[in-house]
């Protein structure tokens, strides 16, 4: 993949306009910026949340493990999830998703409680990640 691409279009005056779009960044350039932790998570989706937390503490950017995990899933490619190997162990994911579709306006917390009432044990994080499936 190239590090830069050129984007071009004709503006409303009929003039040809071009812009260079960077597709490659050096995370070190952002040390001290508010988005540094997020960029570091994006650059290292192969690391565990604990490893990322340890490194961020080392460089003086404190983020909780919860903060890291809530963002880490954004950058992992489908099929490379390093989550628990017993995913859908009870075989009721499809049933849970059907039930969630019936109540689209229910909060994540209330949805987890509703699923539990139907005998489907799923946490709030699972509900958050699968509520749009």
Image: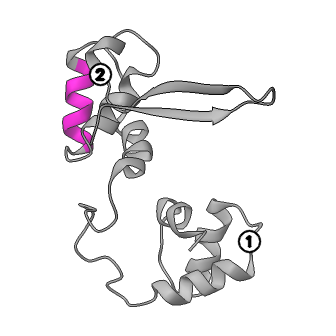
Residue under the image location 50 percent in, 83 percent down = 120
Viewer-nearest residue: 17 or 43: 17
User: Residue under circle 2?
Assistant: 27
The label on residue 104 is 1
In this rendering, position of residue 110 left or right of residue 21: right
Quarter of the image for residue 103 reads bottom right
When the figure is inspected, residue 126 is found, relative to residue 121, above or below; the finding is above
Viewer-nearest residue: 133 or 92: 133
Q: Is residue 11 visible?
A: yes
Quarter of the image for residue 66 reads top left
When the figure is inspected, residue 122 is found, relative to residue 65, above or below; the finding is below
When the figure is inspected, residue 94 is found, relative to residue 131, above or below; the finding is below
Residue 102: x percent and y percent?
73, 82
In this rendering, position of residue 131 left or right of residue 105: left
Give the magenta range. 49-57
Element type at mark 1? loop
């Amino acid at each position: 993949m190239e590090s830069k691409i050129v984007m071009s279009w004709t503006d409303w005056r009929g003039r040809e306009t071009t812009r260079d779009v960077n597709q490659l960044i050096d995370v070190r350039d952002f040390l001290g910026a508010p988005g540094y932790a997020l960029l570091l998570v994006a650059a290292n989706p192969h690391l565990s949340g604990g490893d990322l937390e340890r490194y961020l503490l080392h460089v003086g950017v404190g983020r909780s493990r919860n903060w890291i995990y809530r963002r880490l899933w954004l950058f992992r490619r489908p099929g490379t999830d390093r989550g628990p190997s017993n995913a859908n162990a009870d075989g009721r994911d499809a049933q849970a998703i059907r039930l969630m579709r019936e109540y689209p306006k229910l909060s994540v917390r209330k949805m987890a409680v509703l699923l539990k009432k139907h005998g489907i044990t799923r946490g709030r994080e699972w509900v958050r990640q699968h509520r749009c499936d």
